[in-house]
Amino acid sequence: MLTGIEKIKERKQSGPPLAVLTAYDYPTARLLDEAGVDLLLVGDSLGMVVLGLPDTTGVTMADMLHHTRAVARAKTRAPVIGDLPYHAYDTPQEALKNARLLMEAGADAVKLEGGVSMIPQVRAIVGAGIPFVGHIGMLPQSVVEEGGYKKKGRTEEAARLLMEDAIALDEAGACAIVLESMMPEVAAAITRRICACTIGIGAGTETDGQVLVTPDLLGSFPWFRPPFAKPHADVAAETLRAVREYVAEVQA
Ligand code: KIV
């Protein structure tokens, strides 16, 4: 069992693979923890699956602090990773200031999107003793600039650049790196090459762990579901059933 974020790298050798899920509120965090997840991510995916925004670029530091505090109140066994939202880490100084705020809100580690271009920000965070998680591949905060969600690492050159990003983050002290929506063979090669644990999402099975957006797992956000996410429940259907039953009972 993982007891602290500092233990995360041990799982690369010892296994089992890391089971990671997102949480945005107190009851979900408690339930996921009780069910045995290894890490909880307060992801900025909350913009879409909780706040009803079209993408993650509208999520603010105030949103992230509010939801990180709610998850931290659950006092989970699983360490909590707080996401730095869009434009919260444009400079190393801003990155460090906002990383500290997330830690004060109860996070055990912080995550930001990007590789080589973000190394000064990563060094500022890690240099202050804040555990850091990287995120490369398809970057949701770049979706507007890139004109959509596209799988990464399709060409040799693209795969080489992803490897460079992963090595740079690893050498800068990341304890884990999320590999999002990339060719499985690229994710597997990165996993073999670096010391940090890789946590895949839409990146095949040969990573040190997997992460999912919890509403995709539970089927509680039926309006959009990424192709790689296999729902294990249909919470939307069960909610509709229960609420219709309640409405009928009250109106009978
Ligand atoms: O914001 C988020 O939920 C994430 C996951 C998709 C990894 O970054």
Image (cartoon, grey):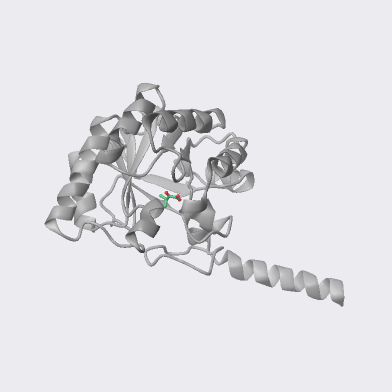
Q: Return the x and y of residue 78 as percentages of the image width and height.
A: 49, 37
Q: Is residue 244 left or right of residue 97?
A: right
Residue at image location 55% in from the left, 31% down from the top: 106
Q: Residue 212, percent across and down?
A: 43, 54
Q: Let me know if residue 195 appears in the view.
A: no
In the image, residue 163 sits, relative to residue 142, either above or below, namely: above
Q: Quadrant of residue 18?
A: top left
Residue at 68% x, 72% y: name it.
241
Q: Position of residue 213 (x, y in %)?
A: 47, 54
Residue ID at (44%, 46%): 86
- How many numbered discs, if any? 0
On screen, residue 129 above or below 175? above
Q: Quadrant of residue 236?
A: bottom right
Q: Is residue 191 left or right of residue 30?
A: left
Q: Looking at the rendering, in which quadrant would you find the C terminus?
A: bottom right
Which is nearer the eye, 66 or 95? 95
Q: Is residue 96 left or right of residue 158?
A: right
Q: Which residue reaches farthest bottom?
A: 252
Q: Quadrant of residue 94?
A: top left
**Residue closest to the eye, 92 or 14:** 92
Percent position of residue 9, x then y: 32, 33
Which corner quadrant holds the N terminus?
top left
**Is residue 8 among the parts visible in the rendering?**
yes
Q: Residue furthest top?
A: 128
74 displayed left or right of 115: right
